[in-house]
Structure formats: C-alpha cells, structure tokens
Image (tube, rainbow, N blue to C red):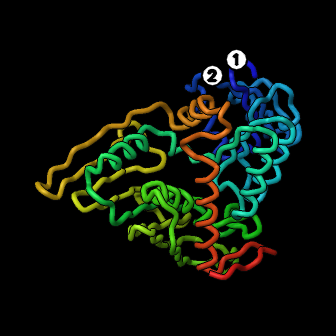
Amino acid sequence: MAQKLRWGILGLGGIAHRVMQGIGAAKNTEVVAAGSRNWDKAEAFAKQYHIPRSHGSYEGVVEDPQVDLVYVALPNHLHKEWTIRAIRAGKHVLCEKPFAMNEGEAWEMIAEAKKHKAFLMEAFMYRCHPQIAKLKELLKAKVIGEVRLIQSSFSFSGINEDNCRMVLGQGGGGLMDVGCYPVSLIRLIAGQEPTECQATGAIGKKSRVDHWAAGFLKFPSGLIGHFDCGMMVQTDWSTNIYGTKGRLRLPKSWVPAPHEAFIEWTRYSDGKTRKFPAAAKHIFANEAEAIVRSLKKRQAPEMTWEDTLGNMRTLDKLRASMGLYWPGEKRKKQ
C-alpha cells in the first residue's frame, strides 16, 4: 500500500459530498478517484474536490490500480454487488449503511472479505466520534447504575414519496435509511442482541415503504430501547439513557457540530447535571483515520463484522414486524 491510503469514491450523491467535506482533515488518507455512471457528474465532482481522476463507470473505480480502498456510497440494493466486486479486484471497502439489504447479503459480503483478506467496514461514522468513546467510558464506570431504558431518535423532513430513497426494490424507507442508526446505538449500549423486536410504520400507498416509523427492542437483561425514525418528520436526533442512578443524554447523537458534541450526566440523588465535551475533527475525518488504524486487522473495533451482522439481523426482524419485505425476499416466521 502507498504511504497514504488512496480512496476511490463509488457513487456521488449527497453522502459522498459530506464525506469529501471532512476527509481532507484526515491523516494518511487521500481521495484519488471518483466514479459515477454519469461521466459529466464524475468530472464535476472530481473538479470540485481536486480529485486527480474521474471515471464514467463504477467499474472504472473498482479496476483503478491507484485505488487502495473503495468507498461504496451507492443505493442500498447495490451495496452487495459492488462491495464484492471491489474486494475481488483487490480493494479494501468502506460500505455505506445499511450494509446490505438483509442479513443474508451481509454474510456473503463478509465471506468475501475473509476469503480475500480485505478490510471491510460498515460506514456508521458516528461510531468513530469521541462522543461515543466517552459514552462507553461512562457506561463502563456505571455512573448511572444499571441501564434500564433507552430512547433514541433520527428523523428528518424534506423527502417525498417519489424520492429514490423511497423505492421498495432499492431497500428504501425510513427504517433502513436512518432507523439503522438508533438501532445500532441501542444495541451498542445494551451490549447484547435483542430477544424481541417490534416496529410500526406509516407505509406509503405508492412507495410501499415506511415514511416514518417507531419501534422497540427488548434485551435479555430486561433493558428496553425504543426509537423513532423517518424522512418525512423532523426530530431532535437525541438519545437518552436512563439508569438506576441517573441519566445520560446525547443532544446530537449522529452528526454533532463541535458545540453539540457533549454528553450530559444527570444524577438522581441531587439533580445535578454535568457536561462532558467531546470535541473532534470533522466526523468523517475520524472515520477515515479509524480505517487506517485498523487496516491490517481487516476489521475496525468501532464497527466489527459481528456488530454489522447483528444490526442487519435486527433490521430484518423489525421490517418483518411491519410486513415490509423486498421483492422476491423470503418471508420469515417471527
């Protein structure tokens, strides 16, 4: 591998732009190629971010000999295909969330990474933020005692039913697009896999996917997590963790600005609240540096393969509880 980890960007939608806005602050990382099925779009993106090469196809990025790692930022239904093609071409892969359409696809992708000794990670960038490291530290110290209840939210407005993120055959809907975040965080805090998963959603008559949804997870310890998600309603993106001795609150759980990156700890005994700041570089710079640190291990501790499989399994159960299946997908008994 070259002195710097050389990235190729596959898919140039909104998330790719946000990654580029932060990745310049990352150490030992550079973007050397950008690819789209639209040549003009690829050229414009490359020019905007001073990327040396652009490709008018996904194949161009995957086969580019100057690329070490492919960032798959494509629609959900294309994650499996292009992750596997990149791995077989000798590349490492950062794949956007949700990792795949279902747990079965996730297993196939991870099997290829194992076979070819490739680094592979699901792009839950929030996991790489110091805010989460501090949260783990506080939970380990049991500052709020035993965790009993978690509330977590990730919903935004501005998407309509005709948006590409609302297509059933492409794995669309609020649960897959943003609900995967609170599900991931609740599982992280619980430190277990849920035994019960239930969700309900507002299913569009045209799109046939959830426009907004809410659900709960119950864990062997008795802990219960509940969440809301969606792309047609705005919420505050906060997470509240209630324990036997106090509460921890993340005002902005997913993409906090510097002034929003902190955790509040409130003690029940005296009602006092203390703030723990968690300043950081741009959140996507943190993610890029986490990859560099873990490249030789093939997995990053921030988001392991086991964790990804657990999240996909949970999302499958939540979808099934809403009666939401992809075309041709086998219906599982709950």
The disc placed on residue 28 is 2
Circle 1 SS class = loop
Q: Amino acid at mark 1?
A: Gln
Number of other residues with Cα within 10 Å of mark 1, as a class: few under 14, some 14 to 19, many 20 or more: few
**In percent of the image, x 49 and y 73: which residue is there?**
215
Number of numbered discs visible in the structure rendering: 2
Left or right, residue 161 beside residue 225 = right
Q: Is residue 319 above or below residue 183?
A: below
Q: Quadrant of residue 169?
A: bottom right
Q: Residue 275 location, x and y as percent?
A: 26, 42
In terms of image quadrants, where is residue 67? top right
Viewed as shown, does residue 114 lie left or right of 272? right
How far is disc 2 from disc 1 in space, using C-alphas?
7 Å
Horizontally, residue 93 falls left or right of residue 314, namely right
Q: Is residue 260 visible?
A: no
Q: Quadrant of the C terminus?
A: bottom right
- Residue 245 seen in this snapshot: yes
Height in image: 182 above or below 136? below
Q: Position of residue 211 (x, y in %)?
A: 58, 71
Image coordinates for residue 260, horizontal then vertical, percent? 37, 43
Residue underneath mark 1? 3
